[in-house]
Amino acid sequence: MSHYFTPVGGNIRQVTKDIVIHSCPFTRGYLLNFGGRMTCVKLPTADDAVVVFAPTPVCEQSEAALKLLAGDKPNVKYLVAPDFEHHMALKAWKDKFPKALIIGPEELKEKKKAEGIDIDIAFKPEEGNKLLSGAALESVGFPKELVDTFDAVYLPSHANKEVMLYHKPSETLLEADAIFNTPSNEQYKGSGVNPKGSWGIPNLMNYMSFDSYLQQKLWSKLYPDPAAAKKAYNELLRLPIRRIIPCHGDLIEGPPAEIASKLEDLVKTL
């Protein structure tokens, strides 16, 4: 069972001039302190359009994150549900911004029907396991303002059908369950809960840092089609990545060559 805290709480931070994050506690099974994160990206458009990736619940802190990025009347035009797990808050955000388009894997359509929500821009399996940019992203349905700002990788080869977005201006990769970097220090900061575990019980997530042995073992289990996933990651590795913003754990930042080396080590486990 997964749950956010009540109230959700958390912390907000401006990562770059165009990116603000809301990091908050999120727990599975009342023991695994995963942490949760929403990433808000402002597009370089005349209307200051905002993309919300992996939305956390609508709350004081998530709304404050939007205001920090885009002022008192943020123009949320796109909501990204990056996989089968990160869509719990979609309805609340769609109700708040009814004109926003939802982006996600096509396979999520059936799952959201009961809430009366559609996936407006859906990645199909045949568009998966490769780096998508320019005309290839337009064929998915991305408007020009998104194509100009992002590249994307869709991984139907991942157990959760993962969508990753690469923010070209800041060389930042946004992802949900593809890469963990725990313990989730920023997400639990100020919550009164130790992300490393409590009652003398160590949290398994202590050992899921970007370059950890446990993450390598997880990767070998997460991909039903490892060859396809490996192809996609090798294409992604052509891009300079100086920052990864995961949904679970602390941000990964450093020289692109260093990040690429660690990601290459993970890819070798597939």
Image: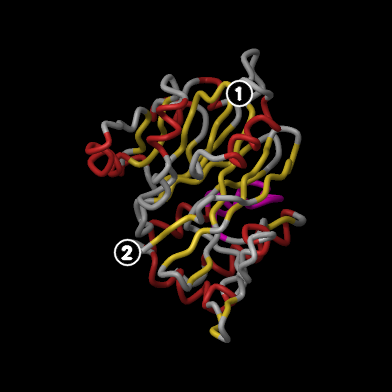
Q: Position of residue 179 (x, y in %)?
A: 53, 60
The residue nearer to you, when weighing 178 against 9, is: 9
Q: Residue at x 66, y 23 (%)?
A: 72
Residue position marked by numbered label 2 in the rendering = 224
| Other residues around mark 2 within 10 Å, as few (<14) / some (14–19) / many (≥20) | some
The image shows residue 184, relative to residue 133, as above or below, that is below
Q: Identify the element where label 2 is drawn.
A: loop
Q: Position of residue 258 (x, y in %)?
A: 72, 62
Amino acid type at circle 2 is Pro
Q: Residue at x 54, y 68 (%)?
A: 266
Q: Residue 28's mark?
A: none
The image shows residue 234, relative to residue 18, as above or below, that is below
Q: Position of residue 246 (x, y in %)?
A: 57, 54
Numbered range of the magenta stretch: 235-248
Membership of 210 in magenta stretch: no
Q: Residue 74's mark?
A: 1
- Most distant residue in the top direction: 46
What is the spatial separation of the Cα atoms under label 1 and label 2, in whole angstroms?
A: 39 Å
Amino acid type at circle 1 is Pro
| Other residues around mark 1 within 10 Å, as few (<14) / some (14–19) / many (≥20) | some
Q: Residue at x 47, y 33 (%)?
A: 79
Instruction: Tell me if label 1 and label 2 are in contact, CB under 8 Å.
Output: no
Q: Residue at x 77, y 55 (%)?
A: 255
Query: Tag 2 or tag 1, which sits nearer the N-term?
Result: 1
